[in-house]
Image (tube, grey):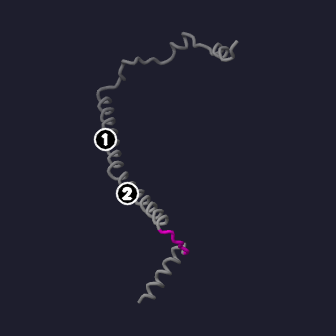
Amino acid sequence: MDPAASSYAEIPTPSIDEVDSLPSSSAGSTTSYSPSEEEEHSDAEREWRESLQQLELLLTMVLVPYLGKYFGRKCAYWGWAKFMEWNYPVKIEITSPGTFKAAGAVEAAASL
């Protein structure tokens, strides 16, 4: 006998009394709100949709362009640096920003 088939046989089925005690809801029935509760519910639903629409506008009009600009520049600088390293292979020995600025100040002072 198949072990999977025997495990299905062990699952108990609920009795009719257990099923009858469960709360019932029909698919076609509406909730029993009073007219004022329905109005409050529809107002809350409308405000929720307006809030979601405002959030969507914030994302599409502000956040996405700003992030695109930021990451686009990062990508462009990285790509340009890789192209220049490939096209003009120059070994740069200055790696720290402080040393780089000091070397620039010395060169600027020497050119005067």
**Which of the pair 1/25 is nearer the observer?**
1
Alpha carbon of mark 1 to alpha carbon of mark 2: how far? 28 Å
Q: What percent of the width, then of the height, locates residue 94?
A: 54, 75
Q: Residues within 10 Å of mark 2 (few under 14, many from 20)?
A: few
Q: What percent of the width, then of the height, locates residue 67?
A: 40, 55
State whether the magenta stretch is mostly helix, strand or loop: loop
Looking at the image, residue 93 lies above or below residue 13: below
Q: What percent of the width, then of the height, locates residue 6?
A: 67, 14
Q: Residues within 10 Å of mark 1 (few under 14, many from 20)?
A: few
Horizontal arrangement in the rendering, residue 63 relative to residue 95 (left or right): left
Horizontal arrangement in the rendering, residue 40 relative to residue 14 (left or right): left
Residue 112, located in which quarter of the rendered image? bottom left
What residue appears at the point 43 percent right and 84 percent down from the top-left corner? 108
The dot on residue 71 is none
- Residue marked by disc 1: 50
The answer to whether residue 20 is magenta is no
**Which of the pair 59/93 is nearer the observer?**
93
Task: Give the residue type that dot 1 points to.
Answer: Glu
What residue appears at the point 48 percent right and 78 percent down from the top-left corner? 101
Can you say which quadrant of the picture contains the N terminus?
top right
Task: Give the residue type that dot 2 points to.
Answer: Lys
The dot on residue 69 is 2
What residue appears at the point 48 percent right and 62 percent down from the top-left corner? 82
